Each structure stands twice: as structure tokens, then as C-alpha cells.
Image (tube, rainbow, N blue to C red):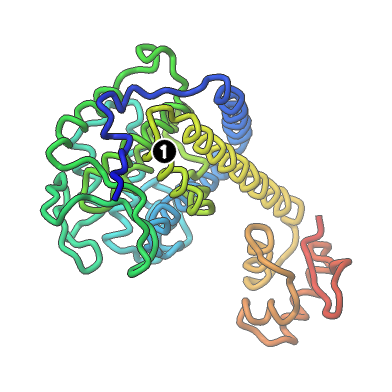
Amino acid sequence: MKHITYIHEYPDWTEWQWSDKKLLPLVSRVRILQGRLLGKLLTLGFDLNVEAQLDAVTLEIVKTSEIEGEALNNEQVRSSVARHLGVDNDSTLATTREIDAVVEMVLNATYHYKQPLSLDDLLGWHRALFPDGYSGLYRIKAGSIRDDSQGPMQVVSGGYGREQVHFVAPSADRLADELDNFLLWFNTSPNEQDSMDLVIKAGIAHLWFVTLHPFDDGNGRLTRAITERVLAQSDESHQRFYSMSAQILKQRNDYYKILERTQKGDTDITAWLVWFLQTLEQSLIAAQMTTDKIIHKTSFWQTHRQHALNTRQVTMLNALLTDFYGKLTTKKWAVMAKCSIDTALRDINDLIEKGMLKKSEASGRSTSYEVAL
């Protein structure tokens, strides 16, 4: 069987090469989107700015875990993020030790973006991910570099019994030196790196750390936390308003394909960086849309602030103004608001009279409703 040479087996493997000609138009588009998003958020009042941040950090934490096949409760995560950010949150939902630990890890990664990244930081983040020293049913060395006692570290995707090996990481005996090299590079300011743009640095940091895969488990989440830190540096803000993990999850198959192709290639990582920057661009566009929704929702409530509504109506209107899937029918209202069809119809007709809802023009066989703009 032919031996595959992985990127980390080349002696000069971190002398990364790429084509500026291919990357610069993408870097420029990403930078414009970052500026536009942060500019828009500056015009929002404090409360809306916090809501946008709460949405983005919650999304990042839920999706970074989902990539690893772990489903966290969205409301519990949001409640924990709100508490850590010192924000009043309606939710009094109890969170778990695991969720609090992941929230602390992600916020720590971005909050201290101006500080150098140390090995102690990485070990601390790893301990936070596995507070009881277990990953599922398996005992792991939380807060310690892997030792390969179970054999070479393979990077795989797919469920149990359907695993697909994408590459084999460097052996454990190389990790001390490799991590030193990585951290030295990571903590070097861009001016000393031939003015490398920070969004390119984020892409390289992601690839470099995921290649090392220095821990028994949790490498993906730590890689994305490191990526978030460089993106915070590129925004010059510890506040996060977009989620790279949400976009990677949407393109998970493509992510593993480009990762595998890059691992089996040479030190020219242009194709990887193009994929990374395109994914970042998509996450910024998605965040732009979320911010527009928050602005729209606020102006809607401002316009209709004089109307007295019941709790069901407020809840349903907020659902319609954020992420509502499909069409709103009387039956759907009754199910979601846990009330009778008659009550649902009364609620809806009342909102139509107040000019807050209207019948959809393309209703088809059953009548549906939408927010009146």
C-alpha cells in the first residue's frame, strides 16, 4: 500500500505559501463586510448591541459543539452566555457545569485577544471542555498533551462504524516542539510577519492547529476558539457578532474534503485559504441578515408600542420577527401558543385590526398570516 505523505511530514511544512493574487480580492470583500457589520452595530443602542452579541456567541457555542456531534440546549447556552456577559436575561433556566465551562472557554478565547496565547491557556481550555476527565464514555487526559498510547492520532469524521479517516496527525513526540513553533508564530505581531492580514492569519492558525491535533479529544473546538481569537484581533474587539462555526457546520462535508486535500498536498495552501475566506464571508453575510432582523424587530415594536397585547401575542410576534419557519396558520398558532383554535383566531384577528398582522397574499388552500410591515 502506497504511503501517503502528509503536509506535516515535509521538513519545512510551516513555511506556508499562497497566491496573493487569488486571496486579496477575497480579503478585501471580507474586510468591507466586517467594517459594514461593525459600523451598523455601533449605530444600535446598547441593548440591541448586547442582543446581537448574545445571539452570535450562543450560535458559535451551539454550532462548535454540533460539529463534534454534541447537541447543547440552545436556551441553556444563551442563559449561561447572558450571565457571563453580565446581561439581564429573562431566562432563569439552570445551566450545566459542562455548558458553563464551554461558554467560559469561548469567551476567554476572545475576551483576552490582545494577550499572548500560552500553552497554559490551551491546557486550561482543554480542562474546561472535559471537567470530569471524560469524553462520552472514554476517560481522557484533560489538560494534557496526548501521548499516542492508543496508537497514532487519526482525524476522522462520521458516526460510529462509519468513520472516515482524513489524515494522521504528527506523532506525540513531536508535539512539544511543534506547539512551541506554533505559539511563537501566533504571538508574533503581523508587522513582523510581513504585514500578513489577520484574516489570512486566522485561516493559517486554524489549519496549523488542527493539523497538530495535540489533545486526545476537543481539538476541533480548540481550533475554532483559536480562530475566533485571531478574528477578534482582526475586528479589534472582544465582542463577537458573527459565527464561523455556524457556517462551517453548514458546509461540514466540504470542510473535511478541503482539509483532507490540504493535508495530502504540499505547503501551498492557497486552496485552503480561499475556502476559509469564502466561509468567513458567508458567516459575515449571515450576521448582517441577523442584525437587520434585530433592527427590524426593534422598529416594529417601536411603531406598535401603544398597543396592549397578551403574552401569547407578544411571544408569537417575536417568533415571527426572528426565525420562523414555514407559514403561520391558525392551527400552528394554537399549537405553538398552547391554546384552542378559537383563541388563536381571536388573537390573530385582534392583531390584524391593530395593523400588526395581515393575511398572506399567497395563502393557497389554507389562510396564512404574516407580519404587517
Q: Secondary structure at mark 1?
A: helix
Q: Nearer the viewer, residue 87 or 215?
A: 215
Amino acid on which the number 1 mark rests in the picture: Thr
Q: Nearer the viewer, residue 95 or 57?
A: 57
Q: 341 left or right of 151?
A: right
Residue 86 % position (x, y): 39, 47
Residue found 77% across the figure and 80% down from its top? 346
Q: Image quarter for residue 191?
A: top left
Q: Image quarter for residue 131?
A: bottom left
- The residue under label 1 is 262
- The residue carrying pointer 1 sits among few (fewer than 14), some (14 to 19) or many (20 or more) residues within 10 Å by Cα, namely many
Is 366 located above or below residue 58 in the figure? Answer: below
Q: Image quarter for residue 318?
A: bottom right
Residue 163 % position (x, y): 35, 62
Q: 325 left or right of 219?
A: right
Q: Nearer the viewer, residue 37 or 255?
A: 255
Is 4 located above or below residue 112 in the figure? Answer: below
Rendered-image quadrant of the C terminus = bottom right
Q: Is residue 186 visible?
A: no
Q: 339 left or right of 205?
A: right
